Image (cartoon, rainbow, N blue to C red):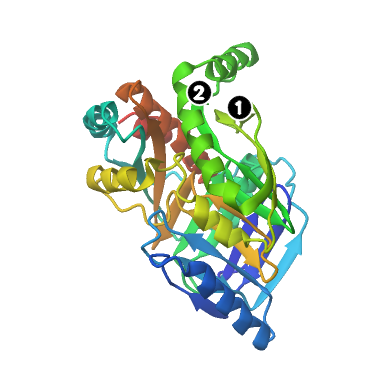
């Protein structure tokens, strides 16, 4: 891994891309981003470059994506890293929530009356955490930590510029697959409904079971599954949807998860085309999509940019993987903006949603080796 390297590591493979020989920074405002990507891959073929693009799609796809064809790419099996002792924490890192917890809870409270009226039935509201580092980010160390702490997730570090030195970049350890395409086979794995895990195994199991029985979380999850199936079904000749969710776990959280599999109709849509058809799902936006997005951009006091977008890759055959860009951060000049959101429905409690966002911020804060006491103080502000 070098300063111009980008990584995408999933449970099925790892890709290390070096440099950005060709770039595409187009939006999907006219539903033509997939066409731009196809042109980029055709250009790569003409120039003898790798037949694969990598990049990130923004939350609001009327804004530009960042897609690129690398100079070279290494592909391997997933990267299991041996358990090692955690490196020394960053004693000089400072953390600043925005908005703070009280203002986030107030934002949720202001959204609740909107959910009592049609058509809005769910909205996802986020907050951020600004992490100021005392020195430039040690990218390779952060990626190592993300993979070590989240071995079953979708770990990525994607440069947003192609220069020697301290490039701006987008990092994450997403637990959620937006879409995977391999030939005619397609897989998606929506997550919605979350609970914080605890160290005691018996108590932790009870928390997971309570989540699986939670009417509020099951309702939130069902909204997501209905939307994903509706978006995916037109592309498929067969689609298998389980009757209900199962539990999935990360190091810090329980999630409700529904793995969905299907067979595509010919001609097969590319992984990028499928990702754009489903994005943004109600798991990161709400429903109906455009109404929820407008409310989000009115209420949230920051721009999401690539948060709640998608990170991944697509090759010239259309195969690829795209992960939902959550548990992530945008790095620029010794500062990382971390993001965490919670799904809000009519039965939501603002204080509970505030705690959920704090727990979700732990994934990246732990990978950055922030002092535990500093983390606790910041996420409870």
Residue 296 seen in the current view = yes
Relative placement, left or right, of 31 versus 381 is: right
Residue farthest bottom in this picture? 47
Residue 92 seen in the current view = no
Q: Quadrant of residue 7?
A: bottom right
Q: Quadrant of residue 136?
A: bottom left
Residue 35 percent coordinates (x, y): 53, 72
Residue 223 percent coordinates (x, y): 47, 32
Q: Residue at x 33, y 24 (%)?
A: 346
Up the image or down, 168 lies above or below 21; here it is above
Relative placement, left or right, of 19 versus 361 is: right
Sequence-earlier tag: 1 or 2: 2
- How far apart are the alpha carbons under marks 1 and 2? 8 Å
Asked if labels 2 and 1 touch by Cβ distance under 8 angstroms, the answer is yes
Q: Residue at x 54, y 64 (%)?
A: 55
Up the image or down, 309 lies above or below 367; here it is below
Up the image or down, 321 lies above or below 239; here it is below
Relative placement, left or right, of 332 versus 98 is: right
Location of the C terminus (image quadrant): top left
Residue 174 percent coordinates (x, y): 55, 45
Q: Which residue is mark 2?
A: 218
Residue farthest right in this picture? 77
Q: Which residue is mark 1?
A: 245
Q: Residues within 10 Å of mark 2 (few under 14, many from 20)?
A: some
Q: Residue at x 74, y 47 (%)?
A: 80
Location of the N terminus (image quadrant): bottom right
**Secondary structure category for the residue under label 2:** helix
Residue 272 percent coordinates (x, y): 57, 61
Relative placement, left or right, of 91 versus 8 is: left
């Amino acid at each position: 891994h070098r300063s111009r390297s980008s990584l995408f590591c999933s449970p099925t493979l790892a890709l290390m891309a070096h440099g950005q020989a060709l770039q595409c920074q187009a939006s999907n405002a006219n539903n033509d981003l997939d066409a731009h990507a196809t042109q980029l891959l055709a250009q790569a073929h003409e120039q003898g470059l790798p037949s694969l693009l990598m990049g990130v799609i923004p939350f609001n796809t009327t804004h530009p994506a960042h897609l690129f064809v690398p100079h070279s790419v290494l592909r391997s099996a997933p990267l299991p890293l041996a358990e090692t002792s955690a490196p020394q924490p960053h004693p000089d890192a400072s953390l600043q929530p925005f908005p703070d917890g009280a203002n986030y809870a107030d934002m949720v409270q202001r959204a609740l009356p909107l959910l009592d009226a049609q058509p809005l039935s769910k909205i996802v509201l986020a907050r951020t955490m600004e992490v100021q580092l005392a020195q430039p980010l040690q990218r390779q160390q952060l990626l190592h930590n993300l993979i070590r702490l989240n071995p079953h997730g979708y770990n990525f570090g994607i440069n947003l510029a192609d220069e020697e030195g301290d490039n701006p970049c987008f990092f994450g350890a997403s637990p959620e697959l937006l879409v995977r395409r391999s030939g005619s086979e397609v897989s998606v794995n929506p997550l919605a409904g979350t609970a914080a895990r605890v160290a005691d195994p018996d108590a932790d199991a009870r928390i997971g079971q309570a989540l699986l029985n939670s009417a509020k979380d099951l309702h939130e999850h069902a909204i997501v599954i209905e939307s994903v199936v509706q978006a995916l079904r037109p592309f498929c000749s067969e689609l298998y949807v389980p009757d209900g969710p199962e539990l999935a776990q990360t190091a810090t959280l329980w999630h409700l998860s529904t793995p969905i599999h299907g067979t595509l109709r010919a001609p097969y849509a590319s992984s990028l085309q499928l990702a754009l058809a489903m994005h943004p799902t109600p798991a990161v936006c709400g429903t109906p999509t455009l109404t929820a997005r407008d409310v989000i951009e009115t209420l949230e006091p920051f721009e999401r940019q690539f948060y709640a977008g998608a990170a991944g890759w697509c090759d010239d055959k259309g195969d690829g993987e795209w992960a939902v860009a959550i548990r992530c951060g945008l790095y620029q000049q010794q500062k990382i903006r971390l993001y965490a959101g919670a799904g809000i429905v009519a039965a939501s409690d603002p204080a509970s949603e505030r705690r959920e966002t704090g727990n979700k911020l732990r994934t990246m804060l732990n990978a950055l080796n922030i002092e535990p006491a500093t983390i606790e103080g910041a996420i409870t502000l």
